[in-house]
């Protein structure tokens, strides 16, 4: 399965590559990709066609194509001269101005990045998925590695019948033939090639329609039917909210969301087809701790900011991430209220201030800025700007910006000018302070928050690093949940039996910060094991086990069947505590140890594997199988797992020495 056959019938009618824009116009890609499951090591190939128009006379055109092989190239059915350097396919001809040409060839490849094959060799969850990440789509699909290129992609895929194939656009047709299925997807509008995506796997789906009639498709693993509602909760509401808030209709034919195994990031806003990590597939309990809502709203907002209107370069990357972050916050505000919105802004302002103190702050226009800068400072720029010019002007400026620059590329000045035009005054001073300066204007941000939210004023007023009688009173009575969490984190000994009567959020803080449990709080603390929070249960289980050895059997019995998130956080802790409770004879200790080691295997998700590796390392029990799996993890496609595996390997080796 690692070798794929790619048949691309590319009808390119609109490409805006900075290096080719002046002399060639590609617009439409029509591609057929054939996945060969039965012959893993074989290579096959088929036809490929490209239609394009020459704008200025030239002797060559090119496509980005990494590690591909090509045969039978022809221009208008006549044999063509070409050069393949492993990165680009360059085609030579006497191309005349205003003439249209057809390039055809066959090709095959075996992608080393951007297209990932999971599970086919280790009895795991068989999947194929892509992640273009700006410039990598050309590793599996001949294209143009430039975010300024806008191409209409119409994709076809031939895959084994047992699997679903999901891609950009509308499913135009689906045909079964000899154990395979041909899936044909149609995109009506142009998009950047890094946003092309395909997912192959075993999925079911739930569908509904937005208020404006856009089909919404929610994909899920067949065994996860009970997790569909909590995972995709509020999806339609957020979609409807963003269309109304932006004053600009969703620009694509439909919207699909697909969870995948061991994704590189939390989510990716491929045009009309968001891919997200299946770590965010949660049940009704997991929703309380680790919901998909923010990622969901963020990737949806990208369908306008990034997909419809794309930044010209990394210098203006905040126009994508800052907008998506801000509008995700607005969508959450619509669901959870003003206090949630302002508290999230407060937290990001604190993080940005700390980044500056650490000497890592940068201008928002620095293409090497951190994600914190692009995402959170970018969101703050929009909140500050809206506060300055007013809701009416801001909203109309955003609508005008989307209308004017749809399906094109932009710079920061393009957006600021749209606001200035309606505002009637220069925003140069604002842009200098909030966008261009290296330091984030943390004082201005806090002043803005305090002027807009009594809730934030109350939170800032609470400070119990130096305990007073007032702190105990605040914890007992009138302050917000967030303020109570703050008090508990600063003074956990102030927790009383009455504190346990608070919300899930406050009780979770008790489980995390009250680690030395007074005997008079034991009974109340034990009730935390019944909370609808896997984070609370995990923390409470360990603290109770540690504080009351005589009741370890009771705690293990009570939590025996709790698994937790997809990384099995509660189950792994339960196994480790069981193995370290010698007198508890209810289980086969060797079997539990083998189960723990088994979770280091490559068929499991990266977070679960890392948790298992950590526990085995702490127990000094990473056996040969564990160490073999750790070695394999060093070459995994997920960068977080690779980094973790290398660091843990070094640590284990140092301990041996």
Image (tube, grey):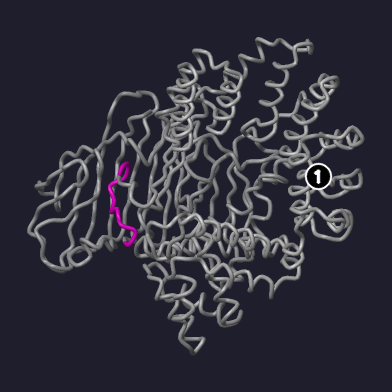
* Image quadrant where residue 152 sits: bottom left
- For the record, the magenta segment spans 139-148
Classify 10 Å Cα crowding around label 1: few (below 14), some (14-19), many (20 and above): many
Residue located beneath label 1 in the image: 507
- Is residue 443 positioned above or below 526 on the image? below
Q: In this view, does 292 lie to the left or right of 471?
A: left
Residue 424 % position (x, y)? 49, 90
Q: In which quarter of the image is the C terminus?
A: top left
Q: Is residue 536 left or right of residue 132?
A: right
Q: Which of 469 and 121 is in front in this view?
A: 469
Q: In this view, does 79 lie to the left or right of 177?
A: left
- Is residue 272 positioned above or below 441 on the image? above
Residue 643 % position (x, y)? 45, 34
Residue 290 % position (x, y)? 66, 45
Residue at 48% x, 37% y: name it.
640
Residue furthest to the bottom in view is 424
Residue at 29% x, 63% y: name it.
14
Residue at 15% x, 65% y: name it.
99
Q: Is residue 559 left or right of residue 143?
A: right
Residue 48 % position (x, y)? 25, 45
The magenta stretch spans residue 626: no
Q: Is residue 262 visible?
A: yes
Q: Nearer the viewer, residue 171 or 59?
A: 59
Q: Nearer the viewer, residue 98 or 89?
A: 89
């Amino acid at each position: 399965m690692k070798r794929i056959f790619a048949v691309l019938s590319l009808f390119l009618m609109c490409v805006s590559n900075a290096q080719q824009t002046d002399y060639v116009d590609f617009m439409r890609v029509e591609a057929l990709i054939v996945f060969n499951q039965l012959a893993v090591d074989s290579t096959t190939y088929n036809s490929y066609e490209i239609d394009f128009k020459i704008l200025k006379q030239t002797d060559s055109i090119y496509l980005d194509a990494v590690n591909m092989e090509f045969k039978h190239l022809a221009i208008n059915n006549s044999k063509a001269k070409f050069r393949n350097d492993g990165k680009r396919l360059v085609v030579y001809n006497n191309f005349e101005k205003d003439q249209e040409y057809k390039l055809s060839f066959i090709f095959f490849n075996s992608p080393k990045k951007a297209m990932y094959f999971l599970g086919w060799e280790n009895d795991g969850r068989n999947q194929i998925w892509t992640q273009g990440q700006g410039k990598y789509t050309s590793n599996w699909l001949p294209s143009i590695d430039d975010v300024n290129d806008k191409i209409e992609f119409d994709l076809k895929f031939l895959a084994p019948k047992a699997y679903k194939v999901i891609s950009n656009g509308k499913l135009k047709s689906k045909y079964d033939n000899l154990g395979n299925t041909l899936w044909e997807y149609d995109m009506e509008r142009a998009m950047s090639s890094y946003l092309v995506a395909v997912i192959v796997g075993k999925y079911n789906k739930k569908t509904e329609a937005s208020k404006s009639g856009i089909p919404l498709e929610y994909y899920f693993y067949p065994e996860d039917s009970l997790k569909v509602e909590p995972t995709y909760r509020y999806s339609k509401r957020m979609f409807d909210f963003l269309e109304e808030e932006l004053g600009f209709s969703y620009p694509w034919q439909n919207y699909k969301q697909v969870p995948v195994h061991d994704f590189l990031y939390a989510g990716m806003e491929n045009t009309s087809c968001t891919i997200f990590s299946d770590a965010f597939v949660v049940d009704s309990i997991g929703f309380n701790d680790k919901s998909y809502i923010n990622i969901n709203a963020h990737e949806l907002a990208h369908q306008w900011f990034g997909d419809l209107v794309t930044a010209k370069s990394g210098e203006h990357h905040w126009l994508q991430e800052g907008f998506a972050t801000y509008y995700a916050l607005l969508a959450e505000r619509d669901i959870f209220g003003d206090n949630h919105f302002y508290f999230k802004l407060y937290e990001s302002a604190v993080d940005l201030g700390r980044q500056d103190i650490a000497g890592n702050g940068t201008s928002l226009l620095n293409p090497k800025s951190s994600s914190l800068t692009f995402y959170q400072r970018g969101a703050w720029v929009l909140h500050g700007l809206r506060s300055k010019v007013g809701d009416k002007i801001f909203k109309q400026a955003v609508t005008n910006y989307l209308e004017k620059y749809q399906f094109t590329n932009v710079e920061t000045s393009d957006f600021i000018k749209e606001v200035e035009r309606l505002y009637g005054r220069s925003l140069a001073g604002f842009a200098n302070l909030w966008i261009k300066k290296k330091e984030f204007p943390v004082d201005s941000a806090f002043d803005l928050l305090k002027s807009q939210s009594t809730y934030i004023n109350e939170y800032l007023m609470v400070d119990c690093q130096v305990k007073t009688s007032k702190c105990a009173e605040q914890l007992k009575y009138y302050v917000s949940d967030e303020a109570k969490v703050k008090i508990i984190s600063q003074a956990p000994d102030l927790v009383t039996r009455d504190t346990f009567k608070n919300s899930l959020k406050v009780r979770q803080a008790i489980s995390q910060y009250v680690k030395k449990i007074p005997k008079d709080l034991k009974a109340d603390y034990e009730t935390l094991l019944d909370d609808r929070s896997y984070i609370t249960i995990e923390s409470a289980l360990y603290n109770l086990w540690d504080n009351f050895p005589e009741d370890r059997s009771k705690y293990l019995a009570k939590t025996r069947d709790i698994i937790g998130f997809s990384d099995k956080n509660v189950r792994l802790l339960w196994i480790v505590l069981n193995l370290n409770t010698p007198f508890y004879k209810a289980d086969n200790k060797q079997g539990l140890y083998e189960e723990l080691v088994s979770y280091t295997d490559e068929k499991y998700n990266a977070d679960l594997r890392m948790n298992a590796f950590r526990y085995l390392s702490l127990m000094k029990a990473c056996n040969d199988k564990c160490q073999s799996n750790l070695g394999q993890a060093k070459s995994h496609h997920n960068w977080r797992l690779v980094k973790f595996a290398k660091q843990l390997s070094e640590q284990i080796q140092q301990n041996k020495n």
